[in-house]
Image (spheres, rainbow, N blue to C red):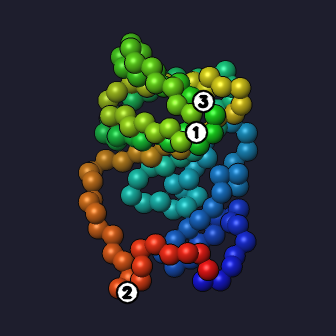
Amino acid sequence: MSNSPETTEVVTGDGFAAGNLDAMGDGPGFRKIRSQLDVKEMGVNAVVIPPGIASGTHWHERQEEVYFVHRGTLRFALGENDEHSITLGPGGVLRVDAATPRSIANVGDEDAIYVCFGAHGGYVGRDGVHREGEPRVRAVE
């Protein structure tokens, strides 16, 4: 495998696309990962929220969502009357059923960034295939 510089702009190839959130938008708001990388099987966006800002409450008709906190501290208010509150920092992950009302607040001192994945249709299962004779883990060359 050849050395390559770190990818910042969206690059595509035979069967893949790669990019960086910083190249997908400026300031607060959505980073449209799905459209930038031509994702077809799920919704996926990143959202930047400034300190002290919260989203309105929303829910979905069909799609379950998974939230991954990349940066900052977010409080998720969950339930019809916000009866559950979950605070997550970097690396935190939350799954929310489609119909569960939720809102998201940046309760930290810096911009918070989360990535949200949404889909409907079920789990595919473990269908990974490895190259025959190649180890599953190896040192970087």
The CA span between labels 1 and 3 is: 7 Å
The reply to whether dot 1 and dot 2 touch (C-beta < 8 Å) is no
Q: Which residue is mark 3?
A: 73
Instruction: Residue at 37%, 87% (x, y): give it.
Output: 133
Query: Helix, strand, or loop for circle 2?
Result: loop
**Label placed on residue 90:** 1
Task: Compare marks 3 and 2 and give the one earlier in the sequence.
Answer: 3
Where residue 35 sits in the image (x, y, percent)?
Answer: 54, 56
The extreme bottom residue here reads: 133
Q: Which residue is mark 2?
A: 133
Query: Helix, strand, or loop for circle 3?
Result: loop
Task: Compare marks 1 and 2 and give the one earlier in the sequence.
Answer: 1
**Quarter assignment of residue 4:** bottom right
Foreground mark, 3 or 2, reads 2
Instruction: Residue at 60%, 83% (x, y): give it.
Output: 1
**Quarter assignment of residue 141:** bottom right
Instruction: Residue at 41%, 74% (x, y): give it.
Output: 136
Q: Is residue 48 depicted above or below 55 in this figure?
A: below
Foreground mark, 1 or 2, reads 2
The CA span between labels 1 and 2 is: 37 Å
Where residue 95 sits in the image (x, y, percent)?
Answer: 38, 37
Instruction: Give neighbour class at mark 3: few <14, some 14-19, many 20+ (Cα, 10 Å).
Output: many
Where residue 99 sits in the image (x, y, percent)?
Answer: 32, 29
The CA span between labels 3 and 2 is: 43 Å
